[in-house]
Amino acid sequence: GVVLKVLSSVYPIPRNHPRSSRSMTIQAGRTSNVKLTAVRMGLLPVLPCPARASVLEHPRERLKMVTPRVLTSVPSRFSIARPREEKSRVFPITVSASSESYESKYMLSTPASLPLYGRRILFTAPRQYASRLSSLLIQSGAHPVWLPAIEITQLSDNTELDAALLQLSEYTHVAYTSRNGINAVLQRLELLHDGAERAQEAVSRSGARFCALGKDGAALLEAGYPCDVLPTEPSTQGLVKELVERGEAQDARIIIPRFVEALEAAGAHAIRVEAYATAYGCYGDIGNVEIRQLLAGEIDAVVFSSTAESEALAQAAGGLERLRKVITATGTLLAAHGPYTAKGAGAVLGLDIPCVSKRFGTFEGVVEALEEVFASRN
C-alpha cells in the first residue's frame, strides 16, 4: 500500500482503504508536534488544524507534503497546492523519496538475480552513515565490508561554536554540509537556550537562514527548524550556485564548517566554525581484517563518501604507494558518492575513480552506480 510518514513513524495504508487515493487524517495530540509529512501523490494528508497548514507538491518527484507552518513563499521547485493566508516566518520545505521504495524493488528477488550478488564492497563511511549504506548494499545482493576509516565525534571545546550560535543575528545564513553538522549544532542550540522550543524561537528571532543539502533538509524540518535554502544539486558547490542565483551570496555573512573559499569567491563573508571533530578511525586492531582482505584482492569495490576517507584508507593500508599498487594489480573498482568526492579522492590516491554517483543526495545513487558498472562487466 501507500506509505505515510509522520515524524519517524511509518503507517501502511492499504490500497483498498476508502480514503487511500484521496486523503488520510493525521492524528496528533498537538499540531505543532507534526514536523513533516511526505506522502505519494494522490494521498492528501489532513492535519487536525487544517487552517494552519500548507500543502506543497513537487512535480518531478511526484510527491506532496504538508507542514503545519503556513508558508508565504516556497522554493521554485514547489507550488502551493492549498495556500493559507496567515503571517508567519517563511518556511521553505522539500522532500525526497525514501529508501523504502528502492529496497522494495528487490524484496522478493532471488539472491542470484540481484545486481550486486556476491560482490564484496568495502566502504569507509563513518559510523553515523554506515548502517544506511550497508542496508542498501545488502538489498542489492552485495556483501558489505565496513572499514571505519574516520570517526566523527563531539568537539572537545565548544567555545567558538557556542559564541557563534549565541550571536546568530550577526549572520545571514547558517550552512549545514552534513547531517552530523545539523545534529551537533542543534544539540548546542538547545543546550544554550534550555530546550528545543526556546532554541527554535531564538533562530526565528535571529533572521538567520538555514541551508542544507539533499535529505538533510528534512532532518531540519523534522526537528522543528527551518530549511530556507536547499539547492537542486545536493553539494557545497550546488549551495554556492543556489545562493548566487537567489542573489543572497553578495555580502552575506555565512557560518559554514568548510568550503569557505568558494563562498568568498561568490562575494560572501564566510566564517568557518567547526561543529564536530573528525579523526582517524582505524586505531589499534580496528580495520586489520578488512585491510587484509583488500590487500589480498578479495574486495570487488571500495566506496568513498568523503575525501578524508581516502586519506585514512591509505594510512590504514600502509601508505599511498602500497594502496595504489594493490588497487592497480587487483583491479578493485573505486567508487565515490558524488563528483566532488571522486575528484578529491582521486587527487589523494593518484588514481581514477570510474564509478561515481549521479544522484548523490542519497546513498541509493552510489549503489545504483555500482550496479551499472558491474552490469557492464558481465
Image (cartoon, rainbow, N blue to C red):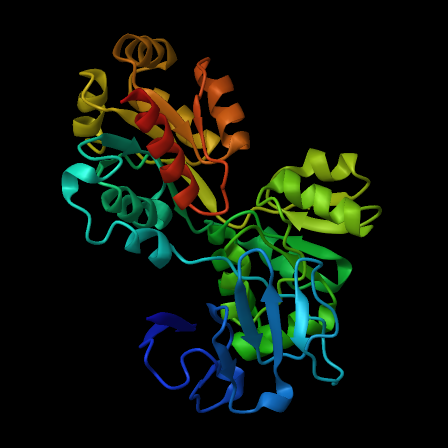
Q: Which residue: 30% across, 26% down?
A: 301
**Number of marks in picture:** 0
- Judge left or right: residue 7 versus residue 272: left
The residue closer to the viewer here, 332 or 97, is: 97
The residue closer to the viewer here, 238 or 280, is: 238
- Position of residue 21 relative to residue 349, above or below, is below
Q: Tell me if residue 188 can be seen.
A: no
Q: Which residue: 50% across, 46% down?
A: 361
Image location of residue 46, percent across then percent down: 51, 85
Image location of residue 15, percent across then percent down: 34, 75
Quarter of the image that includes the C terminus: top left
Q: Which residue: 19% across, 53% down?
A: 108
Q: Tell me if residue 262 can be seen.
A: yes
Image location of residue 274, percent across then percent down: 56, 46
Quarter of the image that includes the N terminus: bottom left
Q: Quadrant of residue 16?
A: bottom left
The residue closer to the viewer here, 191 or 366, is: 366
Q: Which residue: 67% across, 56% down?
A: 229
- Position of residue 291 relative to residue 239, above or below, is above
- Judge left or right: residue 130 versus residue 350: left
Image location of residue 349, percent across then percent down: 43, 17
- Position of residue 70 relative to residue 241, above or below, is below
